[in-house]
Image: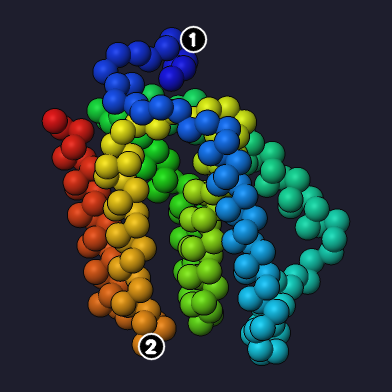
Amino acid sequence: IKLPRGRVLEGPILAGFEKERDRVEGMILLLAFVAVLAWAFVRSRGETRDVRDAITAFASTRSDLWLNLLRFLLASVLLYYGARLVVAHAPVLGIALGMAPLLTGLIVVAIGTALPEVAAAVFAARRGQGDMVMGHVVGSSLFNLLVVVGGMAAFRPLPLPSSFVRFEVPAALAFALVLVPMLKGDLRISKFEGGVLLLAFAAWLVFELAIIQH
């Protein structure tokens, strides 16, 4: 990990890494995302007219094209420099907090980058568009897993810590499976179930923090 002023972090903080995710595996992940998109597209053709109209109304904008293009350009510039700042300083912040790079990404970077998604989800939920919220959550998770990880591995082999396979991936799968019984039947998440999910996240956070102490 490159630190400011050209310093390179070495030693135990980089120990425990498995073999690199190679380009072939990265391409497999990218192809899996293409397959998911194709499946979603085929499935969307069977949606009712009301659902299509709701999606069109949600995506419509009253702004002029030039204004939307200006917003896109400004957002792209801010995203580029924001990403550079995160990559340059998040590892340093994590080290100062006693966190390994993986844990820094799982907690500090993940929470920070998810806050805009939370704001969008709250706005959609207040408008009664819970399906948009769930689609956004699932879609962004699939994009991050298949395109971000797959794209990085396809561009450059990506080393992963062994704990990623032992703890983080099983935890993510378990949290995803928890949603199945919650949504089965009434297709809604109650306040109690939402509280359970928040407590589960807090428990996972405590578990991850406890690991770094040993």
Color theme of the render: rainbow
Single out the mark in the foreground, 1 or 2.
2
Residue 63, x across and y down, in percent: 79, 66
Residue at image point 70% right, 84% down: 53
202 is higher (above) or lower (below) than 208: below
Residue 183 left/right relative to 57: left
Looking at the rendered structure, which numbered label has been put on residue 6?
1
Residue 186, labelled with which disc?
Answer: 2
Q: Is residue 6 above or below residue 98?
A: above
User: Residue at position x 40%, y 32% from top?
Assistant: 160
Q: Residue at x 41, y 83 (%)?
A: 187
Identify the secondary structure beneath mark 1: helix
44 relative position to 175: left or right: right
Specify the quadrant of the image occupied by residue 105: top left
Q: Which mark is residue 168?
A: none
Front-most of residues 131 and 5 = 131
Location of residue 160 with respect to 186 vertically, above or below: above
| Residue 95 seen in the current view | no
Q: Position of residue 185 (x, y in %)?
A: 36, 87
Amino acid type at image mark 2: Asp
Count the numbered circles shown: 2
Up-down: is 126 above or below 93? below
Q: Closer to the camera, 177 or 49?
A: 177
Going by the numbered disc 1, the residue's amino acid type is Gly
Q: Is residue 97 left or right of residue 127?
A: left
- Residue 72 appears in the figure: yes
Q: Earlier in the sequence, mark 1 or mark 2?
A: 1
- Give how far across and how far down residue 34 sits, in percent: 64, 55
Give percent across and percent down for residue 180.
35, 73
